[in-house]
Image (cartoon, helix red, strand yellow):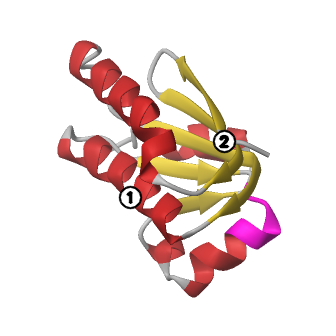
Amino acid sequence: MPFHYNISLKSDFILLELKGELLDAFTAKEMIEKIDEIITIQKEVKSIIIDLHQLTYINSTGLGVLIKVLTKARNNGGEVVITRVEKKVKDLLVITKLNSVFKVVDTLKEAKEYLKPKEA
């Protein structure tokens, strides 16, 4: 299945839904540019939830795309949470140890909770 994405701007985060197969940076170039644009314009929205429940395959180049998204968010004081990961993709995150770089949770609700400001 070809790669598709959907970006939704929520009140306090960006929801990035990935679908299909993320194989190269070229197919995700437009997505990265749109995220960069949103982060630049919407200064209060810094964090990103990446929903992978419809991502069927990702390779090392695709993982590099996820790292670019993480870098953009963190450079702007935000965070990235990955949620609803299919088993094959989750196994790859574990093998590459990226599960220790990204916060990975099972549900969208958990992702939203993680991004909420912590009480002092």
Asked if the magenta segment contains residue 39, the reply would be no
In the rendered image, residue 111, in percent from the top left (x then y), is placed at 60, 44
Give the label on residue 20, or none.
none
Tell which of 115 and 118 is nearer to you: 115
Contact, mark 1 vs mark 2 (Cβ under 8 Å): no
Name the main secondary structure of what is drawn in magenta.
helix
In the rendered image, residue 72, in percent from the top left (x then y), is placed at 27, 43
For residue 85, side relative to residue 25 (left or right): right
Q: Which corner quadrant holds the C terminus?
A: top left
Q: Residues within 10 Å of mark 2 (few under 14, many from 20)?
A: some
Residue positioned 41% across, 62% down in the render: 64
For residue 43, side relative to residue 32 (left or right): left
Magenta segment range? 85-89
Residue at label 1? 67
Q: Secondary structure at mark 2?
A: loop
Residue type pointed to by label 1: Ile
Eyeballing the image, is 117 above or below 1?
above
Asked if the magenta segment contains residue 88, the reply would be yes
